[in-house]
Amino acid sequence: MYTTLVLAMSVDGKIANTRRDPDKFASRQDFWRLEKLVACSDAVLIGSGTLRAHGTTMRVLAEESIADRRSRGWADQPYQIVCSGSGEIPKDLKFFQQPVPRWLLTTESGVGSWPEGDEFQRILVSPGPGIDWRWAWQRLLAEGIERLCVLGGAEIATALWQLDAIDELYLTICPLLIGGLDAPTLCDGLGLDSFHWLKLLSCDTVGGEVFLHYRRGLDPKVTN
């Protein structure tokens, strides 16, 4: 499964403030680039914390992108997979009114309040007390997901880096400072056990934003 991580961060490396406020500090240009990446995906993965903060998820809006998906024999919208180990997702979020196919990735303890039906058309239950990401990856492959777009949050990103499951990173650096020891970064939680090297493919500047595109790379000490 080819996996793309897409994030926007401040100059000091924060992807949100300490309160996880839903302020969208990236520009319309960033939104357009994000939609393009979503349109090329079979599924989108988003954490429940990110979903609670914003209330909605990114779906394909551009008519030309929808037409392109149809020409490929794809559905108009990719699957929207929400990850929540606890299953604690407010049912009044606008997300549940968006015209998208919704899946839930949760645990045996988190699935109780979510019978398959109107809210989530597919529910994947990870064994054990937490999300087993190796199991989840194999399950998504079995479900036919070939191209996955990950939109956050930081702990999911860290888990996927640990699994060595990220193939590409699209990173937007926005011209602001956020600060705060507890503000989430690109890789949150316990951090990474080792360095994960990246290869820069492109660097574009539009207005005050810098758009970086990386691919998973090799340790330069090994390749030189």
Image: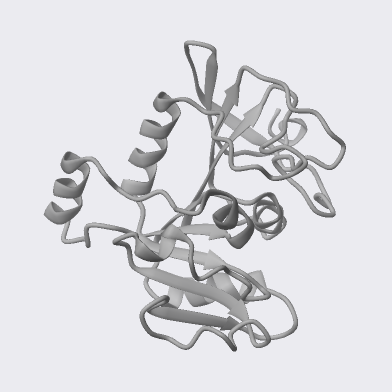
In the displayed structure, 95 sits above or below 168; it is: below
Residue 65 rendering spot, x and y as whole percentages: 22, 43
Residue 25 rendering spot, x and y as whole percentages: 56, 29
Judged from this view, the residue extending furthest toward the right is 181
Residue 126 sits in quarter: bottom right
In the displayed structure, 176 sits above or below 92; it is: above
Please give the name of the residue rendered at 75% of the width and 82% of the height, measured from the top-left corner: 129
Left or right, residue 40 beside residue 137 = left
Please give the name of the residue rendered at 68% of the width and 86% of the height, measured from the top-left corner: 109
Relative depth, front residue between 182 and 162: 182
Residue 33 rendering spot, x and y as whole percentages: 39, 32
In the displayed structure, 96 sits above or below 143; it is: above
Relative depth, front residue between 5 and 93: 93
Q: How is the image coloured?
A: one colour
Left or right, residue 98 beside residue 70 = right
Left or right, residue 215 beside residue 71 = right
Residue 217 rendering spot, x and y as whole percentages: 62, 38
